[in-house]
Amino acid sequence: MPNLQHLFDNNKKWSEKITGNDPDFFQKLARQQNPEYLWIGCSDSRVPANEIVGLMPGEIFVHRNIANVVVHTDLNCLSVIQYAVDVLKVKHIIVCGHYGCGGIKAALTDEDHGIIDNWLRHVKDVCRYYKSQLDAAQTFEEKSSLLCELNVVEQVTNVCQTTIVQNAWKSNQDLTVHGWIYSIKNGIIKDLNVRISGQVEPELLSGK
Ligand code: CO
């Protein structure tokens, strides 16, 4: 039975490298985490949250799912947001999508992908909201890239509308929600400039 020994070897080297720079690193981290950021991103293996923003363990709290979707009733995601906002008091929530997202592309087709199609219904809803903009795209690539961006905007809106974020803003907690997109072709993140840091009228939250 393969026991994935190479991963344990990698892990040992990684741990030694970190303690080589800071012998107390893990002891300090074991006492508490104090991240300033919550990252909500895609599960895609090419978009590792800590690495692409150059942060160490302990510096970013992470939730990932297929196509970085924030569903109003998803207890998994809501629990992560609540812990991050209420307990860790993160100052920033970053929704980061990525171009070339398989989930987004799948949502643009009517092919049968199995159970995941139920999850991707949420992205298909985004398609419906922005139908005219998406219909104007010339090629499938253009349409998929645009939907990757629009999906981020929509999920930022969903984060802002959670009772958790609304209550944080009501009590004047310092909290900003950001929408970013990452290119797997060059490793660069682009800010979609949908920063929201306080209560705004719901109709202003998205371009619908
Ligand atoms: Co993806």
Image (tube, helix red, strand yellow):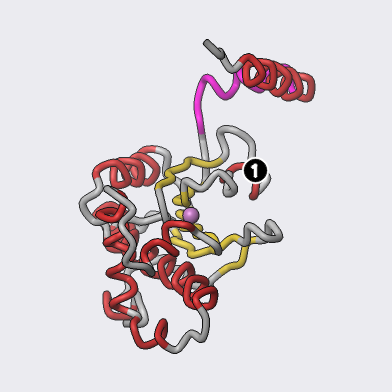
Circle 1 residues within 10 Å: few <14, some 14–19, many ≥20: few
On the image, the x and y values in percent for residue 105 come to 44, 64
Secondary structure of the residue carrying tag 1 is helix
Residue occupying image coordinates x 61% and y 67%: 190
Location of residue 202 by image quarter: bottom left
Q: Amino acid at mark 1?
A: Glu
Question: Mark 1 = which residue?
Answer: 51
Q: Is residue 206 above or below residue 199?
A: below
* 27 in the magenta segment: yes
Q: Is residue 102 above or below residue 51?
A: below
Q: Can residue 38 be seen at all in this image of the molecule?
A: no
Q: Which segment is the magenta one?
A: 22-33
Q: Can residue 57 be seen at all in this image of the molecule?
A: yes
Residue occupying image coordinates x 60% and y 21%: 28
On the image, the x and y values in percent for residue 74 come to 25, 48
* 177 in the magenta segment: no
In the drawing, does residue 16 fall left or right of residue 183? right
On the image, the x and y values in percent for residue 199 come to 32, 69
Location of residue 29 by image quarter: top right
In the drawing, does residue 49 fall left or right of residue 13? left
Direction front: furthest residue: 111
Residue occupying image coordinates x 49% and y 76%: 140
